[in-house]
Image (spheres, rainbow, N blue to C red):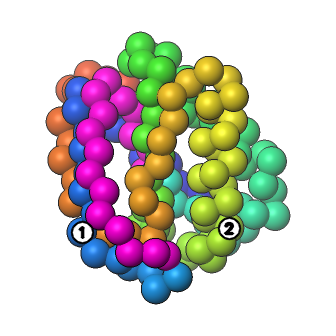
Amino acid sequence: MRLLMVYCWNFSYKTSQRGLESVKEFDEEKEFENALVGFIHVDPQDIAQLSDVVTKLIKNLKWTARKNKTQQFVLHSFAHLAESKANLEDSKQILDLAQERLRSAGYTAEQTPFGYFIDLQVNAHGNFFARLY
């Protein structure tokens, strides 16, 4: 798994175009303040170690959130951090599990629309822990 985390004063998105035929077509626009955005790339071998991978993902997200004093997460499937990538179902499963575990721990956790290209606006902090890979 590859994980790029960006702590944002403000993060917003708007669906631009559908990237997968298998997802329903819709328009959505959302905005978040004081959120840690996780750009998540799932590798092909991650599904074989599902529990460990999700646990490590959650630990990294929560650690970075504590450093930035936020309780809000936005998870974004970002299949551009490495050459090989997991299949779509495995990637979505990992994002769903991470979101579920964050919520059950009392955090706010949302996902950007899976299977869509989205227009992004990112207003990020400039401190040491604001952008981590």
Residue type indicated by callout 1: Ser
Query: First in sequence: mark 2 or mark 1?
Result: 1
Q: Main secondary structure of the magenta part?
A: strand
Residue 100 in percent (x, y) is at: 66, 40
Element carrying mark 1: strand
Magenta stretch: residue 36 in it?
yes
> Badge 1 is on which residue?
16
Q: Residue at coordinates 34% horizontally, 38% vertically from top-left?
A: 6
Q: Residue furthest bottom?
A: 21
Left or right position of 110 against 106: left
Q: Is residue 36 above or below residue 57?
A: above
Q: CA separation, marks 2 and 1?
A: 24 Å
Which percent across, then down, holds residue 131? 33, 35
Left of 90 or right of it: where is 82?
Answer: left
User: Residue 105, percent across and down?
Assistant: 67, 23
Instruction: Please state which amino acid type lies under the numbered disc 2.
Output: Asp
Range shown magenta = 23-39
Residue 11 is at least partly visible in this image: yes
Residue at image position (60%, 53%) is 95
Tag 2's secondary structure?
Answer: helix
State the image quarter where residue 104 is shown: top right
Marks 2 & 1, CB-CB < 8 Å contact: no
Residue 68, percent from left and from top: 39, 18
Task: Indicate which disc residue 101 carries.
Answer: none
Name the quadrant of the C terminus: top left
Looking at the rendered structure, which numbered label has been put on residue 90? 2
